[in-house]
Image: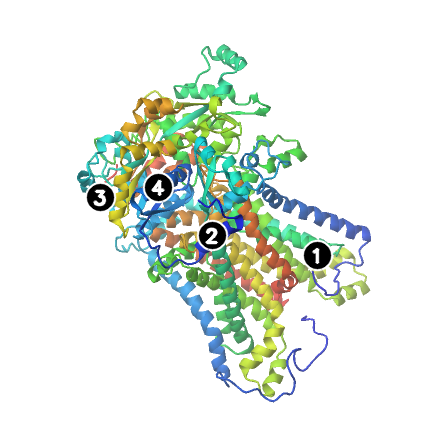
Amino acid sequence: MVKSLSFAGLIAAGLVAAAPLSAHAEGKSLTMCWAAWDPANALVELDKDFTKATGIEMKHEFVPWTSYADHFINLLNSRSAECDLIIGDSQWIGGAAENKWYVKLNDFFEKNKISMDSFLPATVVGYAEWPKDTPNYWGLPAMADAVGWTYRKDWFAKPDLRAEFKAKYNRELEPPKTWDELIEVSKFFTGKEIDGKKVYGSYIFTERGSEGITMGVTNAMYNYGFDYMDAKKPYHMEGIVNSAGAAKGMDVYKELFDCCQPKGLTNAYMQEGLDAFKSGEVAMQMNWYAFFPGLAKDPQVGGDKIGFFKNPAGPTGQFTQLGGQGLSVVAASKDVDDALLYVKWFAQADVQQKWTDLGGASASKAVLMSDAYKKSAPYAPSFVESMGMVKDFWAEPLYVPLLLDMQNRVHDYVVANKGTSQQALDALVKDWKKVFKQEGKDPS
Amino acid sequence: MSDAPSHRPFSEPAPILRWLAGVIVVTYALVSVLPIAWIGMTAFKSQSDAIAYPPKVFFTPTLEGFVDLFTVQTHQPHDFIVKLPPPTSWYEKLARDHDKVIAGPSRVIERFVNSIIIGFGSTLLATFLGTLAAYGFSRFKVPLADDLMFFILSTRMMPPIAVAVPIYMMYRYLNLYDTRIGMILLYTAVNVSLAVWLLKGFIDEIPREYEEAALIDGYTRLQAFRKVVLPQAVTGIAATAIFCLIFSWNEYAFNLLLTNSEAQTMPPFIPFIIGEGGQNWPAVAAGTTLFLAPIFVFTIALRKHLLRGITFGAVRK
Amino acid sequence: MSGMDTITPLAPGTSTRSPPPRVRRISGLSDRAVVWLFIAPTMFLLLAINIFPLIWAIRLSFTGFMANLPRPLGFIGIDNYVDILTDEDIWTNFQVTAHFVFWTIVLQVLIGLALALLINQKFRGHSFWTTVILLPMMLSPAVVGNFWTLLLQPQIGPFNYFIGFFTGAAPSSFTMIGSVSLAPWTIVMVNTWMWTPYVMLICLAGLRSIPEYIYEAAEVDRASSLRQFWSITLPMVTPFLMLAVLFQAIQSFEMFDLVNLLTSGGPGSTTELVSITLKRAAFEKWQTGYASALAVILFVTVFGAANIYVKLLNKVKQQ
């Protein structure tokens, strides 16, 4: 740590770092690549222990979310050796497996007695397996994450609001358990003046450029009947992706957007949600569990003011969108053995526990299912439940066009009011069929 | 902005009209500068002030944004922070107040250095090559001169994104991907077309008699170029340099697509300075303000040449 | 026009009538050699960085190549072109781009010319204020697009409050970037804000180049101010203006950074310029062949239009 340097010294240190470093450091080192967000900072802290234990220096390369996929997929594609270890998005697994970007870990796990049973099953399928539901492992579940909701507990507790709500809806003002309830509560809060400002009912994802609105809308659509394909007939999407239930789910999301989304947040994802919630603009916020530790501690809205609930149910079920990433070894790395050593270290029970303590989110059963964990934080119980009801987007090698097509069609309908939800989904099926044909699959 | 005798399109305007013109222009100037002023202000706000609802015009200034820009920090549990030895510097204290600890310098300095190297490097190279080529076209009968000049202009017409695809593949093949020299070459190629056009116009303006006299005196062509033409072309060269620098300094698309961590400049970096889940507005604002400063200073220093530079060569063939 | 009032045999700074200096290694290069030495590097660089990739792109456009899959190039003839030209989404993008370019030019010309005329009145401090107006142009378009998202945010950004202050509308009653009707105008507004100074500079230079004696002659003929404007000022500024329009049109047509960071092409695809579509196809979906075809189409469009325009410009200059 550079506590003793003057600020100028800090800049000088930066200048030194800027000078072309052609000679590598004397000792061994590994480069860990991930997205740039708070948990990444926690990882930097955690990795200090690894360096203490093995003497291998850990370097970190963090890239902002908006360019995370572009940047690293590019890197992996070009077989660059820049990253030794990568915490890659769950979506990349298909491409990684088929293009051999990652080292296959089956033998390594066996040799070192690392059992996938020690991790939550959803995380194993989501972050490690390709093809799905087969025992072929390409990563170690590293960061368990899912979509959840926060709400202003202090607002929900206000007696006058409670009375008003009860009178109107004939039930108590509580965190919603279904999407219908969610819409009711959102509409209730929208337009009210609280703490001197006009507030909105809820915040949902609407980001257009990378994956935002898709990661949001699926939380509604899954629970109204949407699915990606027929489980029995792979890549059969007609009637499933664009079923009437799926369209209704999209309509419900749009209803929430139209009535209760803060004005102007039409291209908003994670940060804007945090900003909106922290500045007292919304009563409820959709976001990733990864941020909830930070929110719980926030000086303005944390502590007693904040509450958490899992994604509400719909008529056909209760699912939530899976997030999270797995830790993988880059096949092109020059230090595969050292990298594997890191994976072995990371998989240890005490490291997993410390990972969660520092601000990461271990996927290990031992950590998540423990009573200690459930009591450790207000969001913990709903997080564990959420991880039990997750569903993920395609993880095909060509997942990017699939994602971008859905971004396009959903945003066009939900935000830009183009056509109907059924039309959007019909067009999406056409888009997806085209992509799968390119991949050589047989879609229908 | 110039010492030229005043040209007035209308007969001597009444002082009131002149004053009115001034008022309108000043109003426009102030309004158009407001966004930049707001960003400048945001650089000195705390994160919560920056996203305050409604927006704050009055606030307590802080240097948090700059600290966030220049350092990498990690969140720590409050108990851990309390146990650490007391902070030794003002910026460390700032971080601690937010339950964060400084882990080291951020990569912004590298990006800034890259911007300087690539920006000025390509400007120098483009101006140099442009001057030479412009002289060649101006003074000699080059075969197919008109076509070549249009060809040079047309290279500027290609949408950068369009050219980016094959250049990306070419650079990968040549190992120029994510190198400073690769970016310098690319920016030079883009700038040189403008440079040739501008400078040709300037050099056209310089009467040939001076060189001819020098040649008669026994100077070689190269010496005549160096000693006679160049000093007179300084205005044009300065103006060209400003335009080239503005382009290279602020270029985003190519840099985003063709670099990774080694040769990345500031523009692709600034909009993504991260907060918790996305942007840290004070840090972004701080980066924007600091990045604007050098080019602003450079332009002010050479502003007299800027005006002359635009017209000559551009309109005269 | 170069401002030299006195004729001196040699430019200041060079010695006169001195004996020829000792020639060094590059002695007495023939003129031919100098020409090639001077021009060749530039041409070579342009060929390498501009022409060669263009040819490569044309070749790629006839294939179904995807840069992220190790498959060999699959020649598919003009399929990509047919795909693009029959895709109504692409036509919508072209429409969006045309709307953007057209209105940007119109506004920039009107405001830029007006500013230049006003500044030319030479009121006190005009030089300082001109420099202030130049500021937006010196920023990076990407950074501009990015921070305008903060400025235009209805709740936490100052723009809506500013407008609300003058018009009485509630700040959250409208959203510039988020509404389907306003977003296309928002990108026009920000682009205009940024590049009007450029047009203004060019017009100013044009105005300054009009010699005084023409106006004096008109005075003698007792031409009114308006008449002078129409028959002297405007025609003589027009070539400069047309040039500004050419540069700005090309630039707006190719504009990527500003709009992508401001709206990501949204809401929906209402501000998705063709350049954004191209970037997504090329660098996100990795449909390299398809993207190359789109790039070729774009280039041909710009090149063709510019060609016609430059011929027109030359005609105007000759008048």
Q: At numbered mark 4, what does the secondary structure look like: helix, strand or loop?
A: helix
Whole-percent x, y for residue A180 in the image: 41, 19
Are the residues under marks 4 and 1 on the same chain?
no
Do dots 2 and 4 share one subunit? yes
Evaluate whether label 3 is on the same chain as label 1.
no
Mark 4 closeness class: few <14, some 14–19, many ≥20 residues within 10 Å = many
Nearest to the eye among marks 4 and 1: give it. 4
Choose top left, top right, bottom left or bottom right for residue B63. Answer: top right
Q: CA distance from mark 2 to mark 1?
A: 41 Å
Cα distance between the residues tagged 3 and 1:
67 Å
Tag 3's secondary structure?
Answer: loop
Q: Position of residue A323 (x, y in %)?
A: 35, 34
**Depicted C120 relative to depicted A136: above or below:** below
Which residue in the structure is indicated by mark 1? C127
Q: Residue at x 33, y 23 (%)?
A: A372
**Residue A307 against residue B74 in the figure, above or below:** above
Mark 3–mark 4 Cα distance, whole angstroms, equals: 23 Å
Residue A148: x and y in percent read 39, 27
Residue at mark 4 to residue at mark 1: CA–CA distance: 57 Å
Residue placed under numbered mark 4 in the picture: A47
Mark 4 — on which chain does it sit? Answer: A
Dot 2 surroundings within 10 Å: few (below 14), some, or many (20 or more)? some
Look at mark 3 in the image and give the residue it sits on.
A104
Work out whether residue A420 or residue B214 is closer to the camera in this orientation and state it: B214
Residue flagged by tag 2: what amino acid is it? Ala
Residue located farthest toward the front when viewing the structure as drawn:
B85
Lower sequence index among marks 3 and 2: 2
Q: Could you tell me residue A6's position as x and y percent?
A: 52, 48
Q: Amino acid at mark 1?
A: Ser
Q: Residue A437, can we see it? A: no
Pointer 3 local density, CA inside 10 Å: few below 14, some 14–19, many at least 20: many
Q: Nearer the viewer, mark 3 or mark 2?
A: 2
